[in-house]
Amino acid sequence: DKELDRAMVAHTDTHTDTAVGNGVDAVVEKVCSDELPVHSLERELGDCARAVLVRREWLKRQPGVASAEAVGRVPHEGFDYDAVHGACAEMVFGYIPLPVGVAGPLLLNGKTYQVPLATVEGALIASTRRGCKAITAAGGASAAVLSQGMTRAPVIRFPSAIRAAAFAAWMHDPANLAVAQEQFATTTRFGRLTSCRVTVAGRYAYARFVCATGDAMGMNMVSKGVSAVLDFLSAGSFGDLELLGLSGNVCCDKKAAAVNWISGRGCSVVAEATIPGHVVESVLKTTVDAACELNVAKNLIGSAMAGALGGVNAHAS
C-alpha cells in the first residue's frame, strides 16, 4: 500500500515504534505476532490516522475477512481520528459515510427549523418532510420537555433482605441522597445525580439512579458516577454490599420496559398540533375520518392484539 508506506516513512514523531522506519511490513508483522498490541496502536505509534492505516493492513491478513479488497473498500481518508480515540470507538480501521437529507420547514414553538436526518431507509425523509409540511401549514406545533434524566440501576446483593431494605431506606432519605450526589459529582463536570429509587427483591436491591447529563446521552458518564457512589457506600455504612452488575435491567437500557414508559428515561416530552381537515386532504392525501379509523384499528386494537408494550402509537416506544 503506497499510501501507507509514504505515511509511515514520513512519520518522525518520537512516540513512534522504531520498527516504523523499517517499513510497513515490519510494523504489521509486529502486530500480527502480538509484539505490538493492535488495540493500542494509537498510543504506540503516537498518531491516530497512522494507526488506522496499520490496522487496515493487519485486518487484511486476519481470518474471517472476506478479502483484502473488502477492507480496502471501507473509506478511511479525510476523517478526524483524534476526535474518536478514547471517546467513542475502538479498533478503528475506517468509517462509513451516511447520506444526510433535510426535512422541513417545521414550525415548532413559533420558530422554523430545517431538520437534518442521516439515514439509509428509503422514503423516511420524504414522509417526515410531509409531516413537517402538514404541521407548518396548520400553524405549527407546540412542545415542552417534561423531564430529563438518564438512568442506571445496578443490582446489589446483601446478606439478608433486611439489609437490602436498610439500604433502600438510606438511599430514600434526602440527606443521604445529598451525600450520594457529592460522590457522583467527583467523577464529572457535566452530570449530576437528581434522584434514586430502590426496588428490593429479597436480598437483591436495584437502585435506579436518575441523572442529568446535559446535551449528552451520558450512559458512560452515569455509570462512572454510580460506580463512585457504590464504592463510597461499600467503604462505609454498607460494607456488606456486593455489586453483582452495574446494570440490573431496571435501568432499563435498550429494552422495552414499563418502568421507562411510566417513569421516563432520557427526555420526556409533550407535543401538540391541530391539523385542519383541508391540510390532511391536501398534504397527507387522506381524510380525517379515514385517519381516525386507522388510528383505532391499528394503534389501539392492533397494538392490543400484539401485546405491544410502551404506548399505543405508530412508532417505536
Image (cartoon, rainbow, N blue to C red):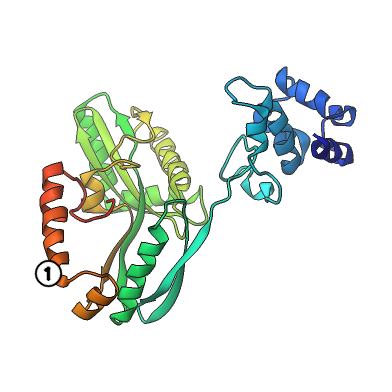
Asked if 76 appears above or below 269 in the picture, the reply is: above
Q: Quadrant of residue 47?
A: top right
Instruction: State whether residue 205 appears in this view.
Output: yes
Residue beneath the point at 32% across and 48% down: 176
Residue beneath the point at 68% across and 27% down: 60
Per the image, label 1 sits on a secondary structure element best described as: helix
Q: Nearer the viewer, residue 187 or 141?
A: 141
Label 1 packing within 10 angstroms: few (<14), some (14-19), many (20+): few
Residue beneath the point at 77% across and 21% down: 29
Task: Tell me if 200 is positioned left or right of 106 in this view.
Answer: left
Instruction: State whether residue 12 appears in this view.
Output: no
Residue kind at label 1, given as amino acid type = Asp
Task: Tell me if 240 is positioned left or right of 313 in this view.
Answer: right
Quadrant of the drawing holding the N terminus: top right
Q: Where is residue 89 drawn, in percent x and y?
A: 57, 41
Q: Quadrant of residue 293?
A: bottom left
Q: Where is residue 256 drawn, in percent x and y?
A: 26, 43
Q: Where is residue 67 drawn, in percent x and y?
A: 64, 27
Q: Where is residue 33 drawn, in percent x and y?
A: 72, 17
Q: Which residue is mark 1?
A: 289
Furthest residue toward top? 33
Task: Tell me if 239 is positioned left or right of 25 in this view.
Answer: left
Task: Tell me if 191 is positioned left or right of 278 in this view.
Answer: right
Residue beneath the point at 72% across and 30% down: 57
Q: Nearer the viewer, residue 213 or 316?
A: 316
Q: Nearer the viewer, residue 106 or 99?
A: 99
